[in-house]
Image (cartoon, grey):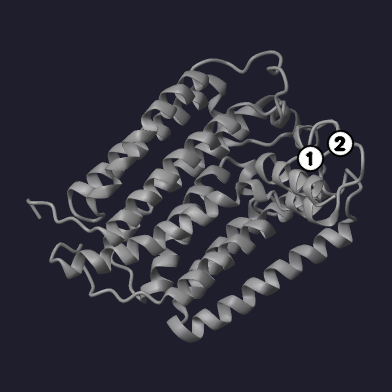
Amino acid sequence: MLADRLRVWKTAYNTANLPVGMTTPPDSISKWIVITRAAVFSMTVTSGLIGGLLAVGAARLAQIGSGPIGGPFTVDYGLLVLAVFGLVVAHAANNMINDYFDLKGGIDTDDYVRAQYAPHPILSGWVTKRQLATAILIANAIDLAILVYLMTQRGPLVAAFAFGGLFVSVFYVAPPIRLKHIGLGEPGVFIVWGPLMTVGTFFVATGQIPGWVWIASLPYAILVTTVLFGKHIDKIEADKKKGVHTMPVLLGEQRARLVARILMISFYPIVLIAAAVGWIGPWVVLVVLGIPRLIEVLGVFNKPRPETPPHSYVGWPLWFVGQAFVHTRRAGALLILGLLLNSFLPIKLPWL
């Protein structure tokens, strides 16, 4: 029945997993929702929208004589939508690339964390290596077509953003670099979900890159990095055994949890300072409504992971990553709301 399928699709999208107790084989849609890990696409959409809304907000603020340095800014909404769509496709390709190369490199096995918290595309028998490789090629071919078109509109600089992201995506796990294995996966994610995605989208939308946009791209990139920190803290022991030296492995669990907490907290002052100096409209002060959730998540990160999962918990043995993701989703949504209000109800600060 359609209602049952919708329930499965919703669960797959919300948890990157199938409903607990599901015994029937998944349909194609729910299977690919899990394989591409669509549950985390919201972070990519948010990074892209931040870039687009920074552009719209800058254009609107300029109209009331309170715009940031640079401009005037004219936003091409068609190119903006196409850029965000391309980012989502790239994220899907990235997730599949990670599974493909981690399996090929002997990292992903039946007893490794990746196969425990959700079905692994290949180990679960859902697809073959060839089918997953084909899906990766199709996703990258779609992005290549989008890139070529965007280059005709904005010039070759678009390719620098696209290929920078592709480099991190592929060599995050692929030899010979394997950024994740040498403690550079977290900085790579920070660069991709901040400067590359947000600044790149701003450039596609406006054709310009004022200096303040680089700074404005950092707060949300920090939050996305905390999600990866959480995931790698969850996998410290398993990664040690595999010789995967993520940053939490290099730092040790206690210091890694401390760094994650510092990064979460830093999001708020950076956003507020950027608003105070006029780079972003003042409505972004709404992010402070995320502080209650921040306090809850900081409390979780302040203690080691529990020995056993809570009742009906989905995704074990992952623990910290879910908490970081919930905070990132809340804070990111509030930032987007603030940027939307900056676009439609711009306010000029008296000291600017």
Q: CA distance from mark 2 to mark 1?
A: 7 Å
What residue do we see at 50% from left, 24% from top? Answer: 257
Q: Secondary structure at mark 1?
A: loop
The amino acid type, in three-letter code, at marker 1 is: Leu
What residue do we see at 82% from left, 42% from top? Answer: 106
- Check the image and report above or below for 171 versus 297: below
Of all residues, the one furthest to the left in this rendering is: 351
Q: Secondary structure at mark 2?
A: loop
Q: Number of numbered discs present?
A: 2
Of all residues, the one furthest to the top in this rendering is: 307
Relative side of 324 to 349, left or right? right
Q: Position of residue 329 (x, y in %)?
A: 50, 41
Q: Quadrant of the C terminus?
A: bottom left
Residue assigned mark 2: 22
Q: Position of residue 289 (x, y in %)?
A: 35, 34
Circle on res. 28: none
What residue do we see at 37% from left, 61% from top? Answer: 53
256 or 144: nearer the viewer: 144
Relative side of 255 to 19, left or right? left
Residue assigned mark 1: 18
The amino acid type, in three-letter code, at marker 2 is: Met
What residue do we see at 62% from left, 18% from top? Answer: 305
Pointer 1: residues within 10 angstroms few (<14), some, or many (20+)? Answer: many
Pointer 2: residues within 10 angstroms few (<14), some, or many (20+)? Answer: few
Q: Position of residue 306 (x, y in %)?
A: 64, 14
Q: Position of residue 33 (x, y in %)?
A: 73, 52
Cβ atoms under marks 2 and 1 closer than 8 Å: yes
**Residue 295 found in image quarter:** top left
- Check the image and report above or below for 306 versus 6: above
- Check the image and report above or below for 70 versus 167: below
Relative side of 305 to 347, left or right? right
